[in-house]
Image (tube, rainbow, N blue to C red):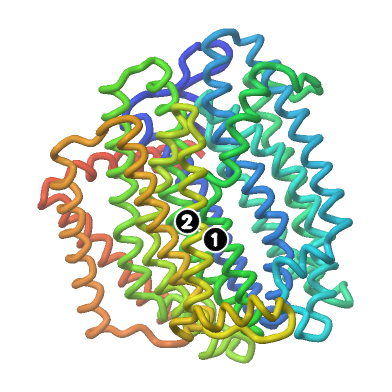
Amino acid sequence: MGSSEDAARYPEDSSLSTGGLSGVARSAGVVGGATLASRVLGLVRDVILANTFAAAATDTFFIAFMIPNLFRRLVGEGSLTVSFVPIFTGWLQRSREEARRVFNAAWTLGAGVGLLITIGGILLAGPLVHLFAPGFALEPGKHELCVTLLRLCFPYILFLILVAVAMGALNAVGHFLAPAIAPVLLNLCLIAAALAASPFFATPILSLGVAVVLAGILQCALQVPPLRARGLTPQPVIAPGHPAMRRLGVLMAPAVLGASVFQLNVLVSRLLSSFEGDGAVSYLYYAGRLIEFPLGVFVVAIGTASLPTFSRLAKTQDRPGLSQAFSGALGLALALALPSTVGLLLLREPIFATLFSWNREVFGEAAVVGCAEALFFYALGLVPITVSRIYVNLCVAHENTRTPARAAVVSLIVNVLASLALIGPLPWGPLPARFVALQHAWTVADMGFAGLALAASIASLANAIYLVVATHRLYGGLLGRGELGRWLRLGVAGVALAGAVWGLQQILPIPRRASSLGLALLALHVAVGAGVYLASLYGLRSPELAALRATFRRRSALRRGS
């Protein structure tokens, strides 16, 4: 199978990346293609879980998995990978041999940190569940089940921190496929556990905890062959005082917040949703997974592919090249995020009805409506998240993680305040009485869990505004005068897409239950909307169309080579 390492080989070739928008688009095609496979399989996984386990059981698993997964995002690819890429890129330009030592030192340090976090998490599982889901204490047995699942899931973080180190090194040398395809293994393990292993457990949901640990081991093992092929075989090197490790610590400290805004805001939503009764956590989770589909396939793919290019151009002080790459990456990301937003808003109920509602006794009409309501408000934040990701990369390329961290603080404050204002009055009991009294006085709407989704989108907007203003002040304008016209073209194409999908819904409505006819009609709506959007971009002569072609040509080449 061909992969993105063709653009940059290590150590035989000193080239680090393909530069400019074309290189970003091709690399994004690799990441996006692999992520698309993972997201499709993840969607299958979620459908199986939704139709196999009761909502009360999935509530406990989603919280138990969220906690180590949050730590992974904070100290894994959320901060470790994005901080390690510019550092490793710099050492590659100085000395290949020393770059190997830097990689091994980071790998060893990551293993040590991951082991400590795992042990601490297992020992403190009870307090952690009470901290992240205090509302579970109101349901008999729910807290205890979540604690058991958390202890099973926590070793996952150890292996995924190692994956994060490998991801940073492989991305820096132009290989994106192995790290991007790794989540497929998690989905396969969870599907197998739900279908085959759960009957062998007295409490079937516990099979998912075992599957999570197995998936972590397999994901880590997957990175070893491409590392060896590039002379980066993992070896223990204890060198915490190495200049690269010290610099990594300096960059990671603020990046723990700066690169993980979305995950931290999700944490607030999960915590408060634990007070909303059975199903609320699951509804937000399934809606969030639908949002992560375009985020992972498009936005994160472009962000992952653009960071090495931004870093190289920033280190060589090629401002015209950086401006072109940044503008192109932002335009490409928006060209994909905008139609995704429109599609999710218009097709939110048909998506859940046709994809999830196969077992009406487990996932019925109330679940469809609840998930669709959460998806509507989450989708409003997709474009701000897209903008934030590209601007964070610009800061990290300049080894500046303080600005994203400050933006994260702003976003978290906005999210907490908006969540408390929109969820409605919290119950008395699990939380301090004084806090509950203040929250009741602060409440402006009683939207329930849907208010949490809206608060997350408001926080994403605040994060994006802060990043745009701050980076413009720090690095000057990297966007030309023609950018507004380009974005207006995207907006017009988005309106055309919305009109086409709405009109088709009036002519061929999608049934509100899972069926082969419903799936076919949903696919037709998506295809027509995509066709109208692309045709509009062509008619408007949008420059983003060429970048989209480059991205999808790369995916087609990968499929032909597989």
Mark 2 vs 1: CB contact within 8 A: yes
Q: Going 73% across and 29% down the picture, which residue do you hit?
A: 107
Q: Going 50% across and 32% down the picture, which residue do you hit?
A: 3
Asked whether residue 515 is in view, the answer is: no
Q: Nearer the viewer, mark 2 or mark 1?
A: 2
Residue type highlighted by circle 1: Asn
Kind of element beneath mark 1: helix
Residue type highlighted by circle 2: Ser
Which of the 4 image quarters holds residue 247?
top right
Q: Going 52% across and 58% down the picture, which residue do you hit?
A: 412
Of residue 346 and residue 36, the one placed in the foreground of this image is: 346
Give the spatial CA distance, label 2 vs label 1: 8 Å
Q: Is residue 141 left or right of residue 98?
A: right
Kind of element beneath mark 2: helix
Of residue 126 and residue 514, the one placed in the foreground of this image is: 126
Mark 1 Cα shell of 10 Å, populated few (<14), some (14-19), many (≥20): many
Image x and y of residue 487, in percent? 20, 50
Image x and y of residue 244, in percent? 64, 20
Q: Is residue 334 left or right of residue 450?
A: left
Residue 348, above or below 34? below
Tell me the number on the disc at residue 411: 2
Q: Earlier in the sequence, mark 2 or mark 1?
A: 1
Q: Look at mark 1 in the image and give the residue it sits on.
A: 265
